[in-house]
Image: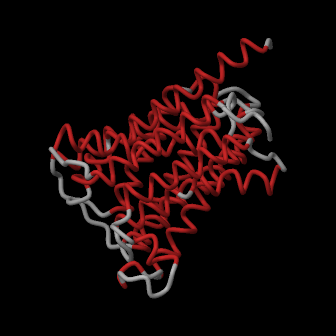
Amino acid sequence: MSRVSQVSRRKAAELALVFNTLVWGATFILVKSALVGISPLLFLALRFSLATAALALLFHKPLAKRDAWKGAGAGVLVGSFLFLGYLLQTLGLRLTSAPKSAFITGLTSVMVPLLGSFVYRNRPRISEWLGILTATAGLALMTLPDAGLLATVLPGAGLAKAAINRGDVLTFFCCIAFAAHIVTLGHFSRRMGFELLSATQVGTAALLSLALCGWTETPHMEWRPAVVSGILITGLFATALAFTVQAWAQKYTTHTRTALIYMLEPVVAWATSYLLAGEGLSRRAAAGAALILGGVLLVELKPLSQR
């Protein structure tokens, strides 16, 4: 493949990942409304189950090939990390605040290059590290209250509610699980078809969600329009479509760039909330959104090419 063709594929893949952030960010307010009438893990179980059924129908020909399932174990591993991330995030959110959960989960973008360097000895470029740190600072401004980050890091800095608790620890491990998902997906996407990889990872997450939803919570569901539409839209678009896109896209771009692009999700979530619910953005949060965008541009424009 020529250099021009490689760059074109990478750009297309990264635009596809940006599309994923648009889908996930746009469905944030939808999921928030749906969870009023359904328990979180049951919602995940139904969401992943619907996505699995859709992918089985869509990819029935590739999946029916005699040797198609030789790499199914890779999808099971990737799907296990995916489910573990969602589970720990849900459990942690019950014990910590939503802003801290959003910030700690966003640290996935920092964990991905660290984990990738440790496992594959693939060091990111200087511009990628600077982009990640810039975007992380922006995420802190968008999600944490004033002095929240300082109080979390420095004892006695004020805001006792920002002290590290059990929910923060669970959310931090959720961040590691999501980072492992991105890194392993990037590894296997270059070695097998995206159809099998997307179907098996989503199917694994569905089975684990169904198996554990009665163990970690008391399942309940109200047949509200918001609940039904939430399951349908997130199952088909934010899960089946989005994770298929990611399985294809990571074949042509790095896991570090994938994680950084996904930091655009809170920016999209705010924009959607503003357009649909009229929720404004403070100057501090607007500055954070600008830093996130600046971090992504820093990686894309590559002003520093030295490793």
Q: For the N terminus, which image quadrant?
A: top right
Q: In which quarter of the image is residue 193?
A: top right
Q: Tell me if residue 147 comes above or below residue 142 in the rendering.
A: below
Q: Tell me if residue 144 comes above or below residue 16 in the rendering.
A: below
Q: Quadrant of residue 39?
A: bottom left
Residue at position x 39%, y 71% in the image: 148
How far across and down, in percent of the image, does residue 124 sit?
74, 44
Any part of residue 126 in sight: yes
* In front of the other: 233 or 118: 118
Q: For the C terminus, which image quadrant?
A: top right
Q: In this view, does 303 lie to the left or right of 244?
A: right
Residue at position x 46%, y 45% in the image: 291
Residue at position x 72%, y 44% in the image: 126
Q: In this view, does 246 lie to the left or right of 252?
A: left
How far across and down, in percent of the image, does residue 169 sit?
53, 76
Q: How many marks?
A: 0
How far across and down, in percent of the image, does residue 302 sit?
66, 31
Any part of residue 236 in sight: no
Q: In which quarter of the image is residue 239?
A: top left
Q: Is residue 194 left or right of residue 42?
A: right
How far across and down, in percent of the image, does residue 53 sit?
45, 38
Q: In this view, does 26 lie to the left or right of 250?
A: left
Which residue occupies the extreme right position in the image?
Answer: 121
Which residue occupies the extreme bottom position in the image?
Answer: 156
The figure's colour scheme reads: secondary structure
* In front of the other: 249 or 275: 275
Q: Tell me if residue 17 comes above or below residue 179 in the rendering.
A: above
